[in-house]
Amino acid sequence: MTLAIAVLASGRGSNLQAIMDAIENKTLDAVVKIVLSDKENAKALDRAREKGIKAVFISPKDFAQKIDYEEAMLQEIKEHHCNLICLAGYMRILSPYFVQNAPCRIMNIHPSLLPSFPGLHAHQQALDYGVKYSGCTVHFVDEGMDSGAIIFQEIVEILPDDTEDSLSERILIKEHQIYPKAIQAFGEGRLRQEGRKVIIQDN
């Protein structure tokens, strides 16, 4: 069965593009049903529209409470019968209400080797701390911030002259590789979670 995906994005949508490219290249058996954004001018919405995918801007300012805003997003996701929600540069923390009421699992990609450097500015956090390696992590979303069970990780060496931008560029290459890979494994039913561990079964 082809996996039906909803993507939440706030910015340029490069990971969304990687997902769409993997679908076109037939390395990912999925279809992006809808892209939702909290930013009206998000490049991710343009990328979706260029591919004929429904792209919806929902303004948090239109709702008195966060729960109402999130319910509007959940309704869109449910209407499109999605099997997986993918966060791709979505810059708002999902509430426990959203996580508990989502109709399917939620997956995210984060630009560090979690549990190190969660939250914003992960690249700069890594540089400031002086670690020798960073990378990226695909994980399931739970009610905490970047605290869900880890699916895949990729390591990137930090170079002596790295800046936030240069490190970000190298990590992004790895992000684009492992996110579609994790989604495909999920779609094939090869991910089994046991407590905090995600067991990846062979084909």
Image: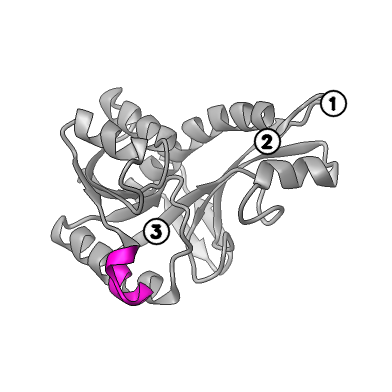
The answer to whether residue 138 is above or below residue 174 is: below
Front one among 157 and 161: 161
Mark 2 or mark 3, which has the lower sequence index?
A: 3
Residue 152 on image: x %, y %: 55, 45
- In the image, residue 157 sits, relative to residue 56, either above or below, namely above
As shown in the figure, which amino acid type bears the numbered disc 1? Pro
- Looking at the rendered structure, the kind of residue marked 2 is Ile
Residue located 19% across and 60% down the image: 76
Residue 149 x, y percent position in the rendering: 55, 60
Q: Which residues are magenta?
A: 61-70
Label 2: state its secondary structure.
strand
The residue labelled by disc 1 is: 160
Binning the other alpha carbons within 10 Å of mark 1 as few (below 14), some (14 to 19) or many (20 upward) gives: few
Q: Can you identify the residue that label 3 sits on?
A: 106
Kindly identify the residue that appears in the image at 34 percent across and 29 percent down: 22
Tell me which residue sits at (20%, 66%) in the image: 75
The answer to which of marks 2 and 1 sits earlier in the sequence is 2
Camera-nearest residue between 149 and 112:
112
Determine whether 90 is above or below 127 in the image: below
Q: Nearer the viewer, residue 6 or 177?
A: 6
Quadrant of res 17: top left
x 25%, y 36%: residue: 48
- The circle on residue 155 is 2
